[in-house]
Image: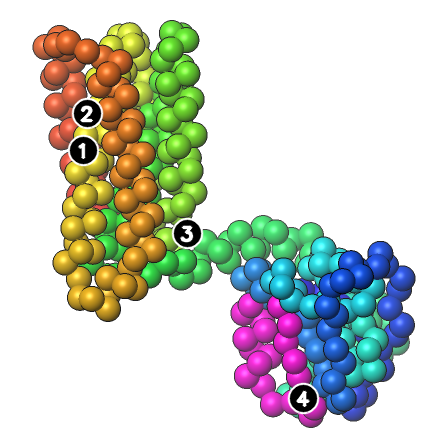
């Protein structure tokens, strides 16, 4: 969580003087010290911090507590501190205006929480505070990985109605496969035009995957992402062996199917109640954006592959369409 400096608090923790740091921008507002109020400065952008702060907010305290999210760029900061410093470690601001950080910050907070006071008393034992600080610094090294794991299990960032959860799972699997289609093309193709085409579209598909991933906590994602990656790679690599026309025809076939798939989801949202449509408006905007990009991919591929395709290419594209339908049906469930 956020971080701060402190001294072992008794009834009201005594906080050591803050070490001199780079002064904040003169015009920036600063956190005011209210009499008898202990202010906890935390990183609201960190999922670990949010959960811990939610716990502290629900506990009784011996004195008033204030909680300030320093990840919010509009939040006022303590004098002489910049936002990066406050986000790097947990901080607590005492009623006397002194700032404590790290393990001592936690001790300062625990000392005013009746159910946690015993931890603060243990920290007052000789050498305990130093050991806690060592443990805290070790945690900071692990925190980035723990944050990524916590984000993967967080609820969806946008409202996703139950009837669309399966579709969103298939979208995530499909965008994963799309990324690997273009990687397959780039592995095999040597034609400069095909490679430029694949690089541009790969960047777009990676962006789609980045946008859709937060919509599904990790447990709700397809369990078959490894097979989808392999299938995507083969879908790109095999036609690349046959040349540019086969690549463009394959992309046109894939994107034609994806366009229909996104449209079905948009139609389902449009059929919801007025209240649900309002709640799903950001999700609808995102899906429509992805659909627009996929249509542009389809149209470009069709322009680059004019004329009639060979019977072998037509059979291959029909197979790709059938495989796409089967993959979506499976990804909705697994």
The image quarter in which residue 13 lies: bottom right
Provide the secondary structure element on which disc 2 rests: helix
According to the picture, the residue beneath numbered tag 3 turns out to be: 214
Q: Is residue 316 left or right of residue 53?
A: left
The image quarter in which residue 302 lies: top left
Q: Is residue 98 left or right of residue 277?
A: right
Earlier-in-chain disc, 1 versus 3: 3
Q: Is residue 279 left or right of residue 114?
A: left
Residue 252 at least partly seen? yes
Query: Pointer 4: residues within 10 angstroms few (<14), some, or many (20+)?
Result: some
Q: Is residue 16 above or below residue 251?
A: below
Provide the secondary structure element on which disc 4 rests: loop
Earlier-in-chain disc, 3 versus 2: 3
Q: Is residue 6 above or below residue 62?
A: above
Between 293 and 132, the one lying in front of the other is: 293
Mark drawn on residue 253: 2
Provide the secondary structure element on which disc 1 rests: helix
CA separation in Å, label 4 and label 1: 58 Å
Q: Is residue 116 above or below residue 146?
A: below
CA separation in Å, label 2 and label 4: 63 Å
Earlier-in-chain disc, 4 versus 3: 4
Provide the secondary structure element on which disc 3 rests: helix
CA separation in Å, label 2 and label 1: 7 Å
Q: Pinpoint residue 152: horizontal percent, then vertical percent.
A: 45, 54
Residue name at image x 63 percent, y 55 percent: 143
Q: Pinpoint residue 90: horizontal percent, then vertical percent.
A: 71, 66
Magenta segment: 50-69
* Residue 62 located within the stretch drawn in magenta: yes
CA separation in Å, label 3 and label 2: 28 Å
Q: Residue furthest front?
A: 27
According to the picture, the residue beneath numbered tag 1 turns out to be: 257
Q: Marks 2 and 1: CB-CB under 8 Å? A: yes
């Amino acid at each position: 969580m956020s971080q701060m400096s402190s001294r072992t608090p008794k009834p009201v923790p005594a906080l050591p003087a803050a070490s001199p740091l780079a002064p904040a921008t003169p015009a920036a507002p600063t956190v005011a010290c209210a009499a008898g109020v202990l202010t906890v400065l935390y990183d609201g952008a960190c999922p670990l911090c949010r959960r811990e702060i939610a716990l502290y907010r629900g506990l009784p305290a011996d004195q008033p507590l204030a909680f300030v999210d320093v990840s919010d760029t509009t939040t006022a900061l303590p004098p002489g501190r910049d936002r990066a410093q406050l986000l790097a470690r947990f901080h607590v601001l005492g009623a006397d205006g002194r700032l404590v950080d790290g393990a001592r910050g936690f001790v300062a907070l625990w000392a005013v929480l009746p159910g946690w006071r015993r931890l603060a008393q243990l920290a007052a034992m000789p050498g305990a505070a130093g050991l806690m600080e060592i443990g805290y610094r070790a945690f900071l090294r692990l925190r980035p990985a723990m944050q990524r794991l916590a984000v993967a299990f967080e609820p969806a960032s946008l409202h996703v109605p139950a009837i669309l959860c399966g579709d969103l799972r298939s979208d995530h699997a499909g965008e994963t496969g799309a990324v690997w289609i273009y990687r397959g093309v780039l592995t095999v193709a040597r034609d400069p035009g095909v490679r430029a085409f694949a690089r541009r579209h790969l960047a777009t598909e990676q962006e789609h995957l980045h946008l859709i991933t937060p919509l599904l906590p990790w447990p709700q994602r397809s369990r078959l992402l490894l097979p989808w990656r392999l299938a995507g790679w083969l879908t790109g690599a095999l036609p690349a062996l046959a040349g540019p026309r086969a690549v463009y025809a394959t992309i046109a076939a894939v994107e034609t199917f994806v366009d229909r798939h996104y449209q079905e989801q948009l139609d389902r949202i449009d059929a919801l109640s007025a209240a649900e449509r309002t709640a799903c408006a950001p999700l609808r905007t995102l899906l429509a954006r992805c659909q627009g990009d996929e249509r542009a991919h389809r149209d470009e591929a069709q322009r680059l592959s004019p004329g009639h395709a060979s019977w072998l290419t037509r059979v291959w594209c029909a197979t790709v369409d059938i495989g796409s339908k089967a993959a979506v049906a499976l990804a909705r469930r697994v």
